[in-house]
Image (tube, grey):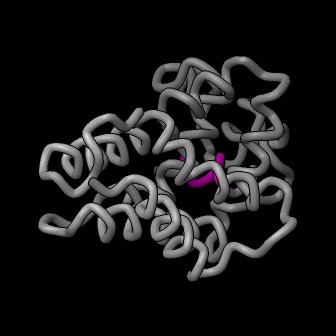
């Protein structure tokens, strides 16, 4: 869709602030009313532009062990942030979310919540199947696994390399196993 492409392009060129409703409408060749018909705010359309690029990164193949499913999900996120424009876009969204409650809410609800739900279900399945301890706080496990990736993305103090996902999962699994 031209609107999502325009939002994504503008964000790449100038960050979230460049993706104003006026600029998106102009770039997409539509009216602002058309955008508002489908999206309630600039943050929502900007996030949808980002999500359109990242939609395939949430699914995990069936039949994987808990360790392999978590590794698959973390590696997909590392590669998405490192190898595509999604890394800079997410950095921009995180930065903008600090001062824009609409963007903060949209990131939490539309980006983080679905991904957390998949990770938490993987952990719950591992607990139910006896691979993981039954007394785990699934929210904390999710945070422990994913927070280092976002930390490296935002601060850039260490690389987002393919070995990171395996190291995070392996170290976490050492403390999570039944």
Residue depicted at 15% across the width and 64% down the height: 62
Residue 169 seen by the camera: yes
Number of marks drawn: 0
Q: Is residue 10 magenta?
A: no
Can residue 3 be seen at all in this image of the molecule?
A: no
Q: Which residue sits at x=14%, y=44%?
A: 128
Q: From the viewer's perspective, is residue 47 above or below residue 58?
A: above
Nearer to us in this view, 107 or 174: 174
Residue 98 lies left or right of residue 173; in this view the side is right
Q: Is residue 157 left or right of residue 42?
A: right
Q: Nearer the viewer, residue 174 or 24?
A: 174
Residue 147 on image: x %, y % = 63, 49
102 with respect to 110 (left or right): right
- Which residue occupies 60% across, 74% down? 164
Where is residue 53? Give x, y as percent: 51, 59
Task: Out of 48 and 26, give the one closest to the viewer.
Answer: 48
> What is the chief secondary structure element of the magenta stretch?
helix
Residue 87 vs 98, above or below: the answer is: below
Q: Read off the magenta span.
A: 3-8
Quadrant in which residue 163 is drawn: bottom right
Residue 7 magenta: yes
Nearer to us in this view, 118 or 99: 118
x and y, in percent, of residue 63 in the image? 12, 67
Q: Residue at x 55, y 42 (%)?
A: 143
């Amino acid at each position: 869709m031209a609107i999502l492409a325009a939002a994504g392009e503008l964000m790449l060129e100038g960050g979230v602030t460049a993706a104003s409703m006026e600029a998106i409408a102009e770039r997409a060749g539509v009216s602002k009313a058309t955008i508002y018909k489908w999206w309630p705010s600039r943050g929502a359309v900007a996030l949808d532009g980002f999500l359109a690029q990242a939609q395939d990164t949430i699914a995990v193949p069936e039949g994987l062990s808990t360790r392999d499913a978590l590794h698959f999900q973390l590696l997909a996120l590392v590669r998405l942030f490192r190898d595509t424009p999604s890394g800079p876009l997410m950095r921009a969204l995180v930065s903008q979310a600090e001062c824009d409650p609409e963007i903060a809410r949209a990131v939490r609800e539309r980006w983080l919540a679905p991904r957390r739900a998949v990770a938490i279900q993987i952990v719950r399945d591992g607990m139910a199947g006896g691979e993981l301890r039954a007394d785990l706080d699934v929210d904390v496990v999710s945070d422990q696994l994913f927070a280092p990736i976002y930390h490296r993305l935002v601060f850039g103090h260490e690389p987002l390399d393919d070995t990171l996902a395996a190291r995070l999962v392996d170290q976490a699994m050492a403390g999570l196993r039944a």
